[in-house]
Amino acid sequence: MAKFYRPQTYQIITFGCQMNEHDSEVLAGLLESMGFYQVDKVEDSDIILLNTCCVRETAENKVFSLLGRLRRLKKEKPGMIIGVGGCMSQQEGMAARIRQGFPHVDLIFGTGKAGQIPDLIRKVMERKGPVLAVRPGSGGIAENLPVKRKEIIRAWVAIMYGCNNFCTYCIVPYVRGRERSRRPEDILDEVAGLGREGCKEVVLLGQNVNSYGKDLEGAIDFAGLLEKLDKPDGGIYRIRYMTSHPRDFTGRLIETIAASGKVCEHFHLPVQAGSNRILKKMNRGYTREGYLELIEKVKTRIPHAVITTDIMVGFPGENEDDFNDTLDIVRQARFDSSYTFIYNTRPGTPAAALEGQVPEAVKKERIQELIKLQNAISLDRNREEEGRVQEVLAEGESKTGPGLLAGRNRGNKMVVFPGGRELIGHVVRVQINEARLSHLAGRLTAQIDG
């Protein structure tokens, strides 16, 4: 019988969104609080945790493929602990599917169980058998958990969890649960701590940040939270947020951002489709006219705002007229960029049962046409930046060439400029000389922070 040993090393493999990236930072912090240390190779790991995503089938397939490859490694190192957590684990029937198809998995844990990882690992070690910890419904929020951040220049800060919107194509409300907001004082304390550690930019995370505070006692909403965070002290230079829903993006929120010195003028407003018929089938809660009116309000109040979006093609029932409506809204809104993707059936969502599934060949043809249009608009929008001086947070050396740094401006566009490594982590001013589709290029004019 193989000897069971106490794990010493770990690796976390993350799939999916920024919220998952942040969850993995918490998992890493908890494991290191137990005395484990991170390694780069799975072959050197005593604990391997997969933090999974189920928004698209391709993400699930990657997890299954990796679990298959880990089977051999588990035979070579039978004392190794393999855990599968995150959204994929939370799907109905998925835990049973994993246990049946991949019996070498020792731990399956859901989206609300990160704080219990130390206890779950100990249970696996004591029982020498599989442990299942998938929560029913929406759990509470565990505060003051250790976090091992991948970087300190920019940091993720979760302000809420879950989603109440139930778009017909989306699995997130079923696996992340209902909306739960963190207390503002806990968020303020975390951001203040990051400022003391030298962090320059925080990104506030939530499935729909516009809904922040609706479940809390006391009159605070997302705009109110931003006002509390927008203080001249604290060390934080910039605040971003994601993701927001166009339906409840209020005029008060636009005014708050316009008046803020720290909140960046980048508005990511997922439109998903330009057809009112499709938007209704998606349960998005707004019309194309209402969406365009919102865009106009933002641009009127903040003329230099950068507006990006998400667009889906091939939703069930989408015909040529519907797709043309989507192309038209892209032309009218003139998004700086778009995350475009093909509709992917998610079992358990209402859209999966809809008639009129669009053929794959049609989906691929449509998305290519959409990408071509958006790329042309994106390049035009980037060219409008030429000659302007912009605030840039230098994040690191650019891969485009030696002696170049790269960082994002307040509109979240990548800027490449000549500079030394001593500027990394600092906020600088860069005059934009050349616009490209992927980034802006310019020259350093000044350093803003000390």
Image (tube, rainbow, N blue to C red):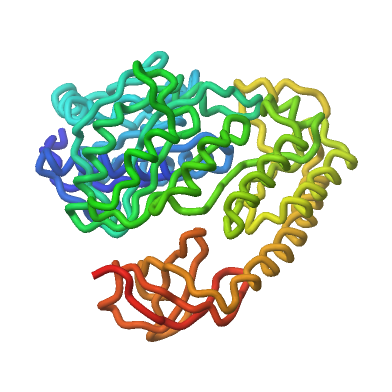
Q: Is residue 56 visible?
A: yes
Of residues 67 and 115, which is closer to you in this image?
115
Position of residue 105 in the picture relative to residue 438 (left or right):
left
- In the displayed structure, does residue 428 sit left or right of residue 39? right
State left or right for residue 209 relative to residue 267. left
Left/right of residue 107 with respect to residue 5 in the rendered view: right
**Residue 45 makes an appearance in the image:** no
In this view, which residue lies farthest toward the right? 321
Q: Nearer the viewer, residue 335 or 446?
A: 446
Residue at left offset 33%, top offset 38%:
228
Which quarter of the figure has residue 395? bottom left
**Quarter of the picture holding the C terminus:** bottom left
Q: Where on the picture, by quarter, is residue 170?
A: top right
Q: Nearer the viewer, residue 151 or 67?
A: 151
Q: Looking at the picture, how far across and down is residue 131, in whole percent?
A: 28, 22
Residue at 44% over, 35% down: 223
Residue for point 50% across, 49% down: 258
- Which image quadrant for residue 58? top right
Q: Quadrant of the N terminus?
A: top left
Q: Is residue 285 above or below residue 424?
A: above
Question: Residue 147: x, y in percent?
Answer: 22, 43
Q: Position of residue 57 (x, y in %)?
A: 58, 38
